[in-house]
Amino acid sequence: QGDQPLMPGDPVLDFYWEALQWLALAEQFGPHALFDIRLVPPHGARSARYGPQAVLCIRNVIPAPHLAPRYAAAQATVLFSGTLSPPQFYQDLLGLPPDTPWVDVPAPFDAAQLQVRVAGQISTRYADREQSLAPIADLVAQQFARQPGNYLCFFSSFDYLQRAADALQSRHPQLPLWLQTAAMDEASRAAFLDRFQAGGAGIGMAVLGGAFSEGVDLPGARLIGAFVATLGLPQVNPVNEAMQCAMDDV
């Protein structure tokens, strides 16, 4: 108003910077990206005055056009992951030069260190989720009683995770539980992992594809097992279908 300067946190200034960032992305839009618009229901009294809000989104599906110039400017680049296979797909996806060498290193783990058990009698299909809660809770409790220690238990969504946690607390209240939440900051994530101490015993519950589903190092007795309740497949929706079509063309 008047000659008053815009301050950080001002909604007009925030919108201005977000618009500049979006325009910078829009200038680079091409076959490697997707554009979609979605409507977000109003939240709060202020937004209710204007009805649903339109959200414009540019999704970078294929990073090759952005990464290739970086590789060209570097003297050397080393990429490593447990999932860079097949090589040709990731070479095209990441924009790697045609003469990129690949090294496939055998896993350092002994197969005898891993035991896999499949509970084929429990259906985790969406329509069967409610009926799956009690059997999952009992299975987790039975394994914990058989071999006490620290476990991770993964679910496909925070809703499924919370419902399973409620079932565990109701049917087996003696089990120590700690849960991943949707709004965890860095300190909260560190506190979650700190619960996994050698000699401890409890169950950390987390979502597949989240902060604790990969890249977490809990050596030795800090983690002795994991439960995976669902496959963690992407949702079937127009955006994911469009992304699948774009990836098929790589």
Image: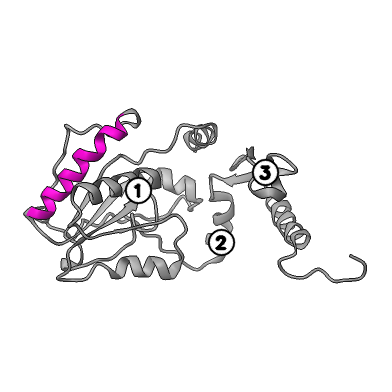
> Element under label 1?
helix
Between 132 and 63, the one lying in front of the other is 132
Residue 85 drawn at (x, y percent): 34, 46
* Quadrant the N terminus occupies: bottom right
**Which residue matches tag 1?**
162
Residue at 46% x, 32% y: name it.
Answer: 236
Q: Which residues are magenta?
A: 128-145
Q: Is residue 141 magenta?
A: yes
Pointer 2 local density, CA inside 10 Å: few below 14, some 14–19, many at least 20: some
Mark closest to the chain's N terminus, 1 or 3: 3
Amino acid type of disc 1?
Gln
**Which residue matches tag 3?**
56
Pointer 1 local density, CA inside 10 Å: few below 14, some 14–19, many at least 20: some
For marks 3 and 2, give the one nearer the viewer.
3
Q: Is residue 103 magenta?
A: no
Say whether residue 26 is visible.
no
Pointer 3 local density, CA inside 10 Å: few below 14, some 14–19, many at least 20: few
